[in-house]
Image: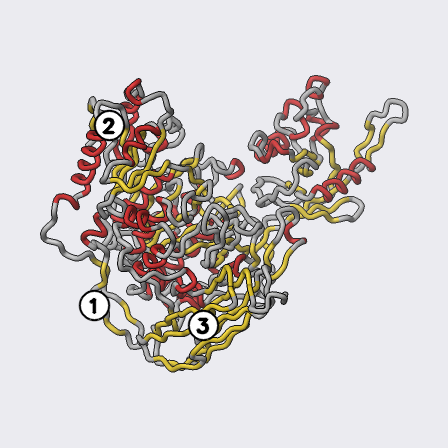
Amino acid sequence: MLVSTKMGCVFGSGVMLVMFCLVIFVSCDYGQNSGDAIPAVYIVTLKHAPTSHYWSELRVNQGPHIKSNGSQRMNRLDKPSITKRIKWHNGSYTAGLHDSLLERTLRGEKYLKVYSYHYLINGFAVLVTPHQADRISRRREVLNVVMDFSVRTATTHTPQFLGLPQGAWAQEGGFETAGEGIVIGFIDTGIDPTHPSFSNDTPTKPYPIPKHFSGICEVTQDFPSGSCNRKLIGARHFAASAITRGIFNATQDYASPYDGDGHGTHTAAIASGNHGIPVVVAGHHFGNASGMAPHSHIAVYKALYKRFGGFAADVVAAIDQAAQDGVDIISLSITPNRRPPGIATFFNPIDMALLSAIKAGIFVVQAAGNTGPSPKSISSFSPWIFTVGAAAHDRVYSNSIVLGNNITIPGVGLAPGTDNMYTMVSAIHVLKDSTAAKDMYAGECQDASNFNHDSVQGNLLICGYSIRFVLGLATVKRALETAKNLSAVGVVFYMDPYVIGFQLNPIPMRFPGIIIPSSDDSKAFLQYYNSSLKRDAASNKIVKFGAMARISGGIKANFSHSAPKIMFYSARGPDPEDNFLENADILKPNIVAPGNSIWAAWSSGGTDSVEFQGESFAMMSGTSMAAPHVAGLAAIIKQQFPFFSPAAIGSALSTTASLYDRNGGPIMAQRVYTNPDSNQSPATPFDMGSGFVNPTAALNPGLILDTSYDDYISFLCGINGSSPLILNYTGETCGGVSTTTAANLNLPSITVSKLNQSATMQRTVTNIDRNETYRVGWTAPFGVSVKVIPSYFAISSGEKQVLTVVLNATISSSIVSYGRIRFFGSQGHVVKIPVSVIVKISFNTTGG
């Protein structure tokens, strides 16, 4: 319940009452008792373990039966039956204890409890002054107090590009059953429940809500009763931290799960959207859309908002609720705005809540971030999180303009072309009067009243694309409306020379148009236009527009064989272990997936992209688009192998990933932001992780490398000074725990930040298929010798094999080098593990 007491303001754990909390909050002023310091939200965690750790209320599998092909399939997922419960482990009772702690500590002072966490983390978020936070931290029940921090958000053809119709979908009985029984939780900007991608009107077979899911759907004016169905089975919103800061506007930001941005609708459709939904944008049909797992279920936990992004306290509350509801997969297309402080990047509230989600058997996917291509730009850090970078797929939309001098200039624009050559007129040359001439932005074509209708009618109108378009102060849509009102036959945008390195997605246009994105091409275009003008010798006035052009059109897709390739914006490794940028022995990203120019559903109220406002689909690019591809594919793997742990799912995806493009050459990576295609080189594991996702192969991995929650705890306990933090976040003690290093975690990769002469590590593989014999081969990183023992082994179904990997530095060098270990199975399986070594110190220090 929400209560307001003389001791302070309390939100409680119920987010559905968040608007009432607004009323309470404004009555809470910070008087002299609290000091003059500015209050902030702090996340407080307590010594007692959370509910899920105490009772192990983790979804467990019923006994498997063995299929005829040797794989195991569970009957269903369920929770253990617990007949007796102690009050301590009840969420409302835990929240009461949190309230009691705050009342005893801050007696007679003002404060605001924002959330109570009890399922994955035992603690709360509270708005207090720094002095009050310090007093809370001194309580014997409290182990950690962290200031809240901000976070940000980081398809029609990709199913075909990934081979799903003839591959993974076919193995699961077709798209009609792909992802059946699996719930994907999206922590994002919400969802538009009216979109046909989330309707349950089309299933051709029964579509029951999974029994292991217990979530609810909030009902508000923006999200009315009936918004949820058998497809969209859960929807909540979390904004208490934003409300305490006074930046939440219930009308503009929607105090409901409704998506006022578009990002959340887009990501949910990529992973789980219905199959065969027509993509119609700006009146043009671009094919039919499908999610990766179209028969999976969606649960939405809105914690990000268009105007201000989001905050960790709200995200942690969303993660906690998703796990409690029983989701199978969590998809996070968000990253922190800064690298987490402290002894290691892993010890932050979001990553530690996700570690508890891993313990609950939930596979966690996170976007790598859009801060590439520089090294150590990765924004997803922990080994238990499956981090996804962005690659281009083979479909491209290209437009071009053919000039009267027979020169063709490439451009972008999802627009029809012109049938013939037409005269071109520049906006700045057809101004109506001197008043219009004084408008310094007139050349952007934002106001039709500035121009002479007769001069524009029947011609191609030339407009400038300035930095104001990048900032959203001017729009292509408005320029198109101007051209239409002036009866132009089309629009040509040239790039202002001050817009350097800006990358354009294809923009929808309802009539002929093109944007020339290159400043060099724009310069050549303007030179042709200006040289074709006829001027009066005496007055220098233009008497004839002589430049002609034809727009080819950009609605029809082209297909490239030089795909996939790693996009310049996709964040890169190595994984920074701490704020001092020491390298962790953990490979990031884990994998790459399609993330560039992705068509997917768009919210009817979406404002994230001005050019797609009012449309039901949008084309977006980013690692935000790559992560839900993998979330959907993970649902298919979870459907095929219900007994797989989160690490096993990640292993299946990683060890089967592709290393080559459609031409059979190495996958390339863009290295610069400006003109990225002109500066590419073969991708390394720090660009693409294990490679490009191969869903069909991931359903038949042969061997998996599994890592448990206890293994992650052993790794964290090995970090100097970590014991209090681990106890704080997980309730686990490091006393008596056998610690391990990151290099010795049983990951499907080997990363060594500093190889001092030699290193020995182990990997344990488990055979999930039939009996098989494997031969081990490897390509050693430059300056390193590799040996794997044994190099040949036979392994029965269900058995494990321990392998010892020995690395020796043969030179001294600080230049990173890469290799790969491969396991070749007699049944045709090929298991691949990338090897990355950064600093090498040989016994003979004079080498290299």
Which element type, helix, strand or loop, lies under badge 2?
A: loop
Dot 3 or dot 2: first in sequence order is 2
**Disc 1 target residue:** 63
Residue sitting at x 18%, y 37%: 97
Q: Amino acid at mark 3?
A: Val
Can I make out residue 277 in this image?
Answer: no
Which element type, helix, strand or loop, lies under badge 1?
A: loop
- Quarter of the rendering occupied by the N terminus: top left
Q: Residue 191 occupies which quadrant of the picture?
A: top left
Q: Position of residue 457 (x, y in %)?
A: 69, 31
Q: Is residue 750 left or right of residue 239?
A: right
**Disc 3 target residue:** 805
Which element type, helix, strand or loop, lies under badge 3?
A: strand
- Quarter of the rendering occupied by the C terminus: bottom right
Pair 2/1: label in front: 2
**Disc 2 target residue:** 106
Q: Residue 655 occupies which quadrant of the picture?
A: bottom left
Give the vertical position of 1 relative to 600 (above or below). Answer: above
